[in-house]
Image (tube, helix red, strand yellow):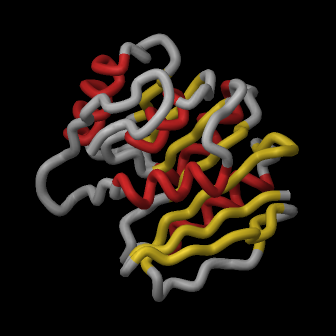
Amino acid sequence: MRIIAGAKKGLRLKSLEGVHTRPTLDKVKESVFNMIGPYFNGGIVVELFGGSGALSLEALSRGAEKAYVFEKNRKACAVIRSNVEKCQYDEIVHIKQADARNASKILQQNNEKIDLLFIDPPYAQNEFYQLGEKIADAGLLAESAVIVCEHDHKTELPESYGEFRKKKSSKYGNIAISIYEK
């Protein structure tokens, strides 16, 4: 697993060994960023179910300015911290060892608008995709925000999260990506 483009292009990242996390494949990550825009001019990234933090780190490498990564697994947080240090993003990545269901409450305290939201829960736990609705309803998304959901290709996600409608959906083997925009 590596960073594909931007300032940290080619940098190899660690992932947690075992079955507790499922890193986004490089080819899927590359496709996601091709769909949402390959580079950013600033913006706040939030990654729910961080795993290795690779999606946030990719966005930062491509020009996002700050990231919040939520992950409740202590060992996964250590891997994220290691990847953040390797990228030298210590000052701009905020790792929250917390359940993603608490993300909206935590983010409201920081009073920032999210530009890019990644929702990538364990595939068997479809109820976590409702967090997109919760975050949209809390008014935490910027007007031009993009929500990216990675899910099992058999899982049907809602057509919208508040005012954010599903604009694109692509399949990569057993993996599907759904993208929501206003």
Q: Position of residue 9 (x, y in %)?
A: 39, 29
Q: Give the residue furthest to the left.
A: 18
In this view of the protein, which residue sits in the foreground, 127 or 24?
24
Q: Quadrant of the N terminus?
A: top left
Q: Position of residue 36 (x, y in %)?
A: 66, 52
Is 65 positioned to the left or the right of 90 in the image? right
Q: Give the residue furthest to the bottom.
A: 154
Q: Residue at x 38, y 41 (%)?
A: 54
The image quarter containing residue 32 is bottom right
Is 126 positioned to the left or the right of 40 in the image? left
Q: Residue at x 83, y 45 (%)?
A: 144
- Position of residue 11 relative to residue 1, above or below, is above
In this view of the protein, which residue sits in the foreground, 109 or 115?
115
Q: Residue at x 87, y 62 (%)?
A: 163
Is 53 positioned to the left or the right of 37 in the image? left
- Position of residue 27 relative to residue 69, above or below, is below
In this view of the protein, which residue sits in the foreground, 145 or 96?
145
Q: Position of residue 86 (x, y in %)?
A: 28, 20
Q: Residue at x 74, y 78 (%)?
A: 159
Count of all numbered marks drawn on residues in the image: 0
Q: Position of residue 62 (x, y in %)?
A: 56, 31
The image quarter containing residue 181 is bottom right
Is 81 positioned to the left or the right of 36 in the image? left
In this view of the protein, which residue sits in the foreground, 93 or 75?
93
Q: Quadrant of the C terminus?
A: bottom right
- Position of residue 157 relative to residue 130, above or below, is below
